Image (tube, helix red, strand yellow):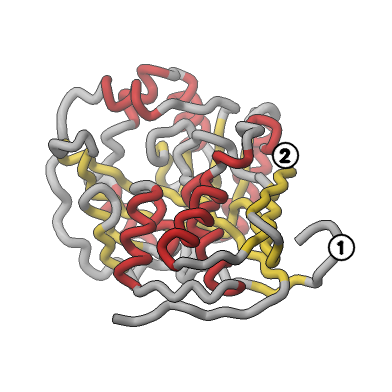
Amino acid sequence: MQDVSQGGNGSFGLLAPAKINLFLHVTGKRDDGYHTLDSLIVFADIGDRLAVRPGEGLSLHIDGPQSQILNTDTAENLIIRAARAVQAHSGSASGAEFHLTKELPVASGIGGGSSDAASAIRLLEEIWTVGYTLEERDALLVDLGADVPMCYGARPALARGIGEVLTPIDTLPDMALVLANPGIGVATGPIFKRLAGFAPPVETIGAVRSFDVLIGMLERYGNSLEAPAIDCEPIIQDVITAMGALPSCALARMSGSGATCFGLFLTQSDAAAAAEQLRSQHPAWWIANGRVLKEPPEISPLPLEPGAP
C-alpha cells in the first residue's frame, strides 16, 4: 500500500473548483438510502479560494461575496470536519489555520462544500505528515460525502455508484462555460422525493475528441433531477431558457440538484461575451464564466503574513 504523506511547512493556497454534472442519471436507490448515479463530471477554473498554514488546533476564517449565507458555526464546516477526519485516520496531532474566500453560491448543485473539503485535504497533505494509505484516504473521502472523492480528483470523469466509482475521461475537447444561479439554494431531499423514476444506466463513454461530438452525446442524456428541481423552484427553467438563448450556447442544463445552471461554449471569448450579456439581462443573478479544467488546480506556496494564512 502506498503512503500519501508529503509533509512540508509554510502557507499554501488552492482553488476549490466548481463541479459541473454535464449529465446526471439517477439509476436506483440502495438499501442504505443512497441513490446510485451515472454522471459525467467536469471542473471549472471558477471556485472558492482556500489557504492553509500550520497552527495551533484547527481554525477557519471565512470571507468573500458568498460568505454571509454560510452557517457561522465554523466548527461544523466541512473543511474542519475534513481536517478532523485526516487527524483521526492518520493519528496526526498537528494543527492548521484555514482561510476560505467563498465565491460559489451555497447549496447550488456545483459541489462547493465538497470541493472545499477535498481541497482542504489536499492542502493538509502538503503541510502535515499524514501517514495514511491510498485506501485509507479513499475511505476517508467517501465518509465525508458522496461528492468529496470526485472533488479530490478534480478532473473529468464518469462517476458511478454513489459518486465514488470514478473512471477518468482523458479525451474531452477544450471548452468554456457560463454558470448562473438565480440567487436561491435548493435542498436536495425534496427534489429526490419528487423523482418520478430511475433513468437507465449510461453506456461507457468512448473517445469524445471534438466539441460537436460531445454536444451530440450530451443531447442523448440529461439530468434526472432537473424536472423535480424545476417543480420545486420554477425559476430554474427561466435560467435554462435564458442561458440557451445566448449566442453560441451549444447546450444549457442544470447541474447537480440545482439551482445553478450551465451553458457550454466552444471558446472562452464566446463564453465571456455570453456572460456579459446575461449579466445585463439579469443583474441580480450570480453569473461566472471560465474554462473546463483538464487537470486539478495546482497547490501554490503563499507568503506567510501575520494573522492570516
Question: Which numbered mark, 2 or 1, is in the foreground of this view?
Answer: 1
Q: Quadrant of residue 206?
A: bottom left
Q: Earlier in the sequence, mark 2 or mark 1?
A: 2
Residue sitting at 29 percent across and 51 percent down? 163
Residue type (three-letter) at the residue carrying disc 2: Pro
Q: Position of residue 92 (x, y in %)?
A: 52, 67
Quadrant into which the N terminus falls:
bottom left
Residue 204 vs residue 138, the one in the foreground: 138
Alpha carbons under labels 2 and 1: distance apart: 23 Å
| Above/below status of 179 relative to 304 | above
**Labelled disc at residue 24:** none
Q: Position of residue 217 (x, y in %)?
A: 26, 54
**Labelled disc at residue 306:** 1
Q: Position of residue 108 (x, y in %)?
A: 50, 35
The answer to whether 277 appears left or right of 221 in the picture is right
The answer to whether 125 appears left or right of 148 in the picture is right
The answer to whether one can see residue 175 in this image is: yes
Q: Position of residue 80 (x, y in %)?
A: 56, 49
- Residue placed under numbered mark 2 in the picture: 65
| Above/below status of 141 relative to 288 | below
Q: Residues within 10 Å of mark 1 (few under 14, many from 20)?
A: few
The answer to whether 196 appears left or right of 42 in the picture is left
Q: Residues within 10 Å of mark 2 (few under 14, many from 20)?
A: few
Quadrant into which the C terminus falls:
bottom right
Residue type (three-letter) at the residue carrying disc 1: Pro
Residue 134 vs residue 272, the one in the foreground: 134
Residue sitting at 50 percent across and 34 percent down? 107
Residue sitting at 39 percent across and 18 percent down? 232
Q: Are marks 2 and 1 in contact (CB under 8 Å)?
A: no
Residue sitting at 19 percent across and 23 percent down? 196
The answer to whether one can see residue 266 in this image is: no
